[in-house]
Amino acid sequence: MIPRNFTSDESHILVTCPRGLSGFVSTEIADAGLPVLSRFPTGVRTRGTLDDCISLNLALSTAHHVLYLVFAGTCATPAQLYASVSALEWERIIPLDTTLSVTSTVHTKSITDTRYANLKCKDAIVDRLAAKTGARCNSGPGRDGAVVHLYWQDETCMVYLDTSGETLTRRGYRLVPGGAPMQETLAAAVVRAAAWNGQTHFVNPMCGSGTIAIEAALRALGRMSGTLRDNFGFMHLAQFDGTRYRKLRERFREGERKNLDCRIIATDIDPGAVKIARENARAASVDSVVEFSACEFDETEIPRGDGIVMLNPEYGFRLGVPELLPAVYKRIGDFLKRRCSGYTGYVFSGNFELVKKIGLKAGRKVPFLNGTIECRLYEYELYQGSRSSD
């Protein structure tokens, strides 16, 4: 089942994502010119070549992993799993000088410890390589080399090459995360949900470690998030062509904007958080277009014109003093009504009771999950005399 030529032979591709973001991933896949075959809460299925997988790894901002299918069949027992996997021509795909890692999603009655499935899959690959080449590659838990993913549900078995390796949410710019940071993929989806196009101002009070502002800057500049990374799973496959990859990467970089006609402003009351945000923005090479400063959120500069203002206040679950937060949310409402006329306001929160303290009627409520916390992105049209909620 392993394709003879990864640059021209197509296979099914599974793009995984955080629960609830598959709609955004579908849009990004379609924008990349690939078909959306099916979609479910934590992923999207498409079809393409290994080169397409490379493009997706560079382009996708809301996905976690790009998985390239090399085997699909039935396995009722660990012995059948071993036989099926060892029958594949791994000598054509896994070089001996890399480190192999096996990950899995396993739900089958034939084993009680999913680590055993990983071990059988890894043994099948390494034993096949030893039989065909006389040598064995190293293996380990890290994802910095070649990564194979096993999906085993009941008797359905699929084996993928994880062309991403480490999850794509790890862009490489968040040098210091700060307290309870939002994942990069979630931040990118939140910016996309606001339909911000980089043509109007973007104001982000309560910026924390800067993830939302940085993802907004990357989008405005047309910079593919994957171009910030220097290591992917596909780089450790035998048929990887480094020259072709560098040309593809450069083609993506040529489409980037150098400057913006709008302003991106990010503030936080904590000077330490602002320092971290600046360092992260510098690592993402967007420090020249994001203006950071330390101040109270309702003292943030709102430039003349229009745009969006987006806040991600504390929910009171992991951060914040719960008894003080109602007053904070009320101040958010006052800030939006009095200072942000003509803008569209967004508040991302996982505390639905506190949001009522804002005192504005949301035009949209977009559902998200922040880890295990159910959240909403509340949208407020901020015209003169904005309506209060009932």
Image (cartoon, rainbow, N blue to C red):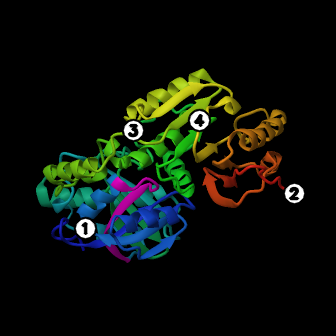
Disc 4 is placed on an element classified as loop
- Marks 2/4 in contact by CB < 8 Å: the verdict is no
Q: Marks 3 and 4, Cα distance to the nearest angstrom?
A: 19 Å
Q: Of callouts 2 and 4, which one flags the residue occurring earlier in the amino acid sequence?
A: 4
User: Where's the C terminus, which quadrant?
Assistant: bottom right
Element on which disc 3 rests: loop
Residue at disc 1, secondary structure: loop
Query: CA–CA distance between discs 1 and 2?
Result: 53 Å
Q: Residue at x 75, y 44 (%)?
A: 337
Q: Which residue occupies 43% across, 35% down?
A: 289
Mark 2 surroundings within 10 Å by alpha-carbon count, few (fewer than 14), some (14 through 19), many (20 or more): few
Q: Which residue is mark 3?
A: 172
Q: Which mark is residue 390?
A: 2
Residue count near mark 4 (Cα–Cα under 10 Å), binned few <14, some 14–19, many ≥20? many
Mark found first going from the N terminus, 1 or 4: 1
Query: In this rendering, would 120 be left or right of 112?
Result: left
Residue name at image x 24 percent, y 74 percent: 1
Give the magenta-colored segment's residue range.
59-73
Q: Residue furthest right?
A: 390
- Marks 2 and 4: which is nearer the front? 2
Three-letter code for the amino acid on which mark 2 is drawn: Asp
User: What secondary structure do most residues of the magenta stretch adopt?
Assistant: strand
- Going by the numbered disc 4, the residue's amino acid type is Cys
- In the image, residue 378 lies at what x, y percent? 68, 54
Q: Which residue is denoted by mark 1 in the rendering?
A: 49
Work out how far the residue at label 1 is from the one at label 4, CA to CA, in angstroms.
39 Å
**Residue annotated with mark 4:** 207
The image position of residue 343, as x and y in percent, is 63, 48
At mark 2, the secondary structure is loop
Question: Identity of the amino acid at label 3?
Answer: Gly
Up the image or down, 24 lies above or below 101; here it is below
